[in-house]
Image (spheres, rainbow, N blue to C red):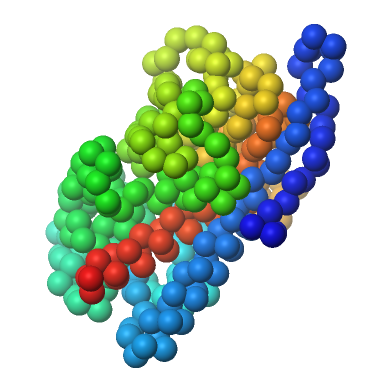
Amino acid sequence: MEEKQLVSSFCLCARIMPLNLYLCPMQILDGKIASQAVKEKLKSTVAHLVAEGKRPPHLAVIIVGNNGASETYVASKVKNCAEIGFGSTLIRLDNDVPESVLLQQIETLNNDPAIDGILVQLPLPKHISEPKVIETISADKDVDGFHPVSVGKLVQGLPTFVPATPYGIMLMLEYYQISTKGKHAVIIGRSNIVGRPMSILLSSSHAYGNCTVTVCHSHTPNLKEFCLQADILVAALGKPEFVTADMVKPGAIVIDVGITRVADATAAKGFKIKGDVAFEQVAPLTTAITPVPGGVGLMTIAGLLQNTLQAYLNKFN
Ligand code: NAD
C-alpha cells in the first residue's frame, strides 16, 4: 500500500455549491499500481509452489479469427502469465472454423490435467454460439466466470470464479480501501460480463459490498437522474465519453469500464482508447476515479490471473 498515490490531492470541483466552490480530494485509482500489487503476490505464490517441486498454474487461451482488439487482449494475457510464472498455451483458430471444431478443442482442454484454466476470447464470429461455447468449458476451469454454474454460485454468495472485470474492480476497491458499505451504487450496463455481476458483487454482504444498487440500461428513462444519486457510479455501456459532468454527484467514486477504439488520425495506431466517462470534465468532481487506459482494463487481467490460481488450487486441495 506504500505505493498508493494521492494524485492531485485537492482540486476545484466545477459544480456550484453553497460557497460557489466545492473542494474535494480526488484520487486516481491507478490500475497499473493496483494490478502490480496483485501480480507481485501471485508471483511470490508461484515461486513458492515451484520451490516445493510443484508445477505452476497453466492457462489456455483460444482466439478465433484476428480481431485487432481481441489480439491485443490475448497477447496481454499471455504476457502477464509469463511475468508471474504461470504457464500459458495460446490456440489460434481461423475465423471460419466450424463450431464443432472449437467445441472439440475445448473438450480436449477440459480433459487435459495440465491445464487449469480455459478462456475463449469473446466476441466470437456470428456462426458460433457463445452460450454453447461458454457451457462447454468445464465449470472447474471457467476462469472467465461466465459459465452458468459460476454465475449461479455468485448469485448465491458461494465461492466461485467471479467474472474477471468485476473481480478486478473489487480488487481495485480493496487495494485503495474504498468504503462501499451503505453507499448507493449506480451501474450503467447490465451485460453478463460486467454490469450484471458487478451489481451482484456490490449488493452482496462482504467487505467492499453492502451497497444499495441500481442497475441502469438502454431502456432506463431519466438515466441522468439515477446517475446524480450515485455515490459510486460504474459506467459499463461501451459509449465513449457518455458520462459527462452534469451526470455526476460531487464527491462520487467513478469506475469507468468502457474501452472503445475511436479513430484518430493523429494517433500512431490510427485510434485512441476512450472510456465511457468524459474524464477531463468528470474527474475534478469526484473523490476517486479510474482512468482509461490504465484503470479497470489492467485489473481485469489481475482478476483472470487470480481465478487461474484458484482453479489450480481447487484441483489440488
Ligand atoms: P454490452 O454491449 O454487452 O452491454 C452494454 C450495456 O450497456 C447493455 O446492458 C445496455 O443495455 C447498456 N447501454 C447501452 N447504451 C446505453 C445507454 N445509452 N444508456 C444506458 N445503458 C446503455 O457491453 P459490455 O460487454 O458490458 O462492455 C461495456 C464496455 O466495457 C465496452 O466498452 C467494453 O469494451 C468494455 N469492457 C471493458 C473491459 C475491461 O477490462 N476494462 C472488460 C469488458 C468490457
The front one of 210 and 83 is 210
Residue plotted at (43% across, 77% down) = 46
Picture quarter containing residue 33? bottom right
Return the residue nearer the eye: 292 or 160. 160
Is residue 213 among the parts visible in the rendering? yes
Question: In this image, 213 relative to 296: left or right?
Answer: left
On screen, 137 above or below 17?
below
In the image, residue 207 lies at what x, y percent? 44, 42
Q: Where is residue 261 in the image (x, y as percent from the top left)?
A: 57, 44
**Number of disc labels:** 0
Location of residue 63 (image quadrant): bottom left
Left or right, 96 with reference to 219: left
Residue 94 or 223: which is nearer the viewer?
A: 223
Q: Where is residue 154 in the image (x, y as percent from the top left)?
A: 27, 43
Q: Horizontally, is 162 left or right of 181 in the view?
A: left
- The C terminus, quarter of image: bottom left
